[in-house]
Amino acid sequence: MKNLNLILAGVFFTVAAPFGGLLLSGHAQLGALGRAPAEEGGPLFPAKEPGLAIQGRQVYLELGCVACHTQQVRPAGQGKDIAQGWGVRPSVARDYVLQPQVALGNRRVGPDLANYGARAKSDAEIAAHLSAPAAGSAMPAYAFLFSPAKDGSLQPNERGTALIAYLKSLRQDYSSPEAKLKQ
Amino acid sequence: MSQENQNSRPQGQGRPQGRPADAGSPRVSRVDASVASPVKFFFASALLWLLVSSVLAVITAVKLHLPGFLNGCEHITFGRLDAVQRNVFFYGWASNALIGLNLWLLAALGRFEFRNGWIATLGGLIWNLALTAGVVTVLLDSQNAFELLELPRGLAPAFFVAFLLAALWPAVAFARRPTSQVFVSQWYILGASFVLPVVYLLAQLMVLWCPTNGVLQALVHSWFLQNFLLLWLGASALAAVYYFLPKELGTTLNGYYLTTVGFWTLFLFAGWTGPATLLGSPLPLWIQSSGVVAAVMLLIPLTITTINFFGTLSRDSGWSRAWNNTTLRFVAFGVVAYTLAIALQIVFSARSLNAVVRFTAFTAGQQQLLTYAFVSMVIFGAAYFILPRLTGAFWPSAKLVHLHFWSCALAVVGSVAGSLFFGWTQGAALAAGKPFAETVAPQSALLGTVCAVLFLIGHAAFAINAFGMLTSCSSSTDEGRHA
């Protein structure tokens, strides 16, 4: 048919244009982004996750936590994320360079978790929230992440411990070349 | 390009609900018979998935305001069921139905007797088996963090091959037939059938198989998602509107000469709109701004479809005639929803407005407006037209047709309006500095549950009617079926 080639060529162009203009250009800019110190000679950020947190990330993905929680702090002027206490600075691309699967999320039924590790006071506090969320919270209790201890209290099992370690590892409270913290 | 309906006559007024336009004994033409088997397979599969999706939607809606509901087993947590419900709806219901609908439209428009229909059916079988495996994996094992890419990456080759067999191959086979006539619906179908496998393959590679660095994954995902929503679901449903609207009204399309521009501008700009859904993210500003510009440029195809559809419906009492015609009632509903959905997408790509509604239920409402109020309602309308022609039977119950329309229409209006309203009020409260926990309105989840139940009622009515027709067709004789 005489129009087939025209249609397919045109549609190919319409797919290729944003692929090149956005994705490949974005890759050229950010593809090689890695860890960096905020100041010369300083420690590299973001810090590497401990092994237990890497296992916990898998639990986070399995349970679909991303359905209700985001992991991105928007800059001032684009929402009030910082005023909500969810972060001390906006998220930047470098914060995510170590993550094998970036769980930015697109809906907040619950609060943002990008900097949750910095505001959670202790493992016990996180465990208490997972096993028995506060009244009025839309979050269910994750009883299967806990086992009863000898004294009758609930203690996180292997997966629960990993998830808590992962949640504690979520921190964006360090300076990076693109987002320096105010002293 | 030429108009689909140049030689058609006014049809569809005052006949019983659910009856096909060419009233009298329903007959299956040779063209329809050539695609009957695969199209019926795709519609039957879509219906089953729609019922599964509806039940899951009720459960997830209840879980949102009663978190303890069905919370004893880790395999049915909200996070897992939400992902399964979404994938079942988009890959099971919408995609199955659109593959079948596109196949029928290609055959009907081109008077094209489709050979080797078993290849498309085989593709459909692989597609549905892959989806089933994906659903089981998400429930029992793991999922990915990206909307509509949650299913395990190992199933991607199966989905890809299945789509090539079921949709792309028939489209190319059709396009290679010896004729010079090309209708606008066919352009949309060819475009949609080409775009989906390409962007799906690239997104799988760049997000799951060889992940790009950090937030670039989110960029690739947004590109995939916008292509999926606008250029697969949207373009396929637009193809159906361009066919059914003039066909059932028995008139020519208003401003037909503009359709070429509408087609190319939609395909040109829609693929760039992904970053407009990521405003405020850690992506570079120039990428986000490109998305905003592209979203604003959607004004061009939106203006053209508005001239085409509303102009056509406004002539010769088109709206009242559409109201009295089962197919057109659903299609006209979809047309209004499409216009609103794209208009909202344009308006809320403005940074100041997007900052208010981002991450709230508002964006879910916008998506539902496009994917249910537009795409699904058009599919329903098309099914009321196509299935009698494929089965040679009438819809068994006019009451169930009414129940289907009113349940789904009320549910989607309530659900979308509720999401937009509660999303906006929550965003405004957050912008005013209220603590997050105080901005969550419990009425929102309650309304969602009521609407989910209404959806289930409507879909059950539709399924009972459709399976009743398919059953009566298979149990009756073939006499008079073939023209």
Image: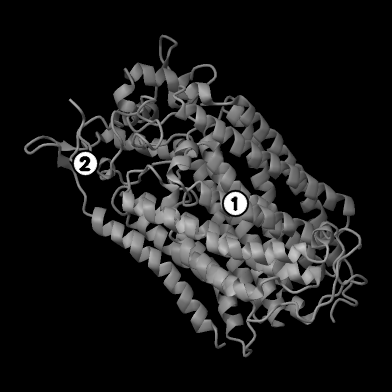
- Reading the image, the residue beneath label 1 is B341
Q: Chain of mark 2?
A: A
Amino acid marked by disc 1: Ala
Say which residue appears at 91% left-offset and 63% top-offset.
B15
Distance of mark 1 from mark 2, alpha carbons? 36 Å
Residue B428's place in the image compared with B184, above or below, is above
Q: Nearer the viewer, residue A151 or B393?
A: B393
Q: Position of residue A131 (x, y in %)?
A: 46, 20
Residue A13, picture quadrant: bottom left
Pick the front one: B336 or B368: B336
Identify the residue shown where x is 63% and y is 61%: B96
Q: Nearer the viewer, residue B146 or B300?
A: B300
Q: Residue furthest top?
A: A151
| Near-viewer residue (B259 or B278) | B259
Q: Quadrant of the C terminus of chain A?
A: top left
B340 up-or-down from A64: above or below? below
Q: Are marks 1 and 2 on the same chain?
A: no
Q: Can residue B57 be seen by looking at this rendering?
A: yes
**Residue B217: % across, % down:** 36, 51
Quick check: A46 left or right of B56? left
Instruction: Rate crowding at label 1 as few (under 14), some (14 to 19) or many (20 or more) other CA atoms within 10 Å.
Output: many
Q: Name the residue at 47% across, 48% down.
A: B349
Label 1 is found on which chain of the structure? B
- In the image, what residue occupies the spot 32% across and 57% down? B210
On the image, which quarter does residue B131 sit in?
bottom right
Q: Amino acid at mark 2?
A: Glu
The residue that disc 2 covers is: A178
Helix, strand or loop under label 2: loop
